[in-house]
Image (tube, rainbow, N blue to C red):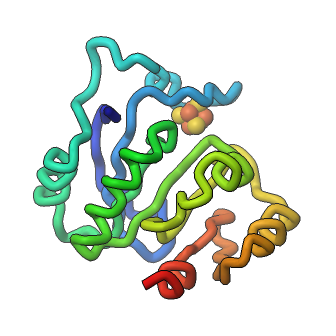
Amino acid sequence: MLKYLYSQVYTKEIPNELSLGISVLGCPVHCPECHSPHMWNVNCEGEGTDLTVKELENIIEQQKWVSCILFFGGEWDMMHLNKLLKTCKDLEYKTALYSGHELDWFKIKHPNFHLYLDSIKANCKRVTKLSEILSFKLIGHNIMLSHVFSFYCFKSILLNIR
Ligand code: SF4
């Protein structure tokens, strides 16, 4: 089960979107220059709220005028995160993920990570290399790349899938 610490509306995190950001607790990545070490409580002892599908629906209901649901973390339980992302897509929101993991980590560990994602900012501390973009293309997906903040936009993938 994922837990979250808080949710907040952001105007600039995802280009051209008003985003409802959900800060998922228990980040196991532990980047050396982490700006949010308070999110590291890996076992979530005494902190956070269960991020069930119902809880997500409640959070969204309170800010339903946003255009995008942005998860800060949660990829360490990709099966559950995918359920949450699917819920967002079913409610017709765009979806995004910030992760401290490299894109290669997703490709190897969770090749279907993009099924319900419109955008991802992989390895939030580093500009992703063009070689990574090209190697991702070799998997066979038709990626539309937004250069703003080195986001990968998966709109074209979603179009191909649906
Ligand atoms: S992924 Fe984000 S929250 Fe996690 S350690 Fe890195 S900077 Fe901190």
9 vs 76, left or right, is left
Q: Is residue 93 above or below residue 55?
A: below
Tell which of 26 and 36 is nearer to you. Answer: 26
Tell which of 153 and 160 is nearer to you. Answer: 160
Q: Please state the horizontal and vertical placement of residue 5, each as a whole percent of the image.
A: 31, 32
**Ligand 1 found in image quarter:** top right
- What residue appears at the point 75 percent right and 67 percent down from the top-left corner? 136
Tell which of 155 and 161 is nearer to you. Answer: 161
- What residue appears at the point 60 percent right and 57 percent down from the top-left corner? 121
- What residue appears at the point 29 percent right and 64 percent down from the top-left corner? 88
- What residue appears at the point 22 percent right and 71 percent down from the top-left corner? 91
Q: Is residue 132 above or below residue 47?
A: below
Q: Is residue 25 above or below residue 46?
A: below
Q: Which corner quadrant holds the N terminus?
A: top left
Q: Quadrant of residue 138?
A: bottom right
33 vs 81, left or right, is right
57 vs 141, left or right, is left
Q: Please state the horizontal and vertical placement of residue 159, each as a whole percent of the image.
A: 48, 86
Q: Please state the horizontal and vertical placement of residue 11, each as a whole percent of the image.
A: 39, 63
Q: Is residue 131 above or below residue 155?
A: above
10 vs 104, left or right, is left
Q: Please state the horizontal and vertical placement of residue 63, each as a whole percent of the image.
A: 17, 60
Q: Which corner quadrant holds the C terminus?
A: bottom left
Q: Of all residues shown, which one is farthest toward the right?
A: 131
**Exactly how many numbered labels are in the figure?**
0
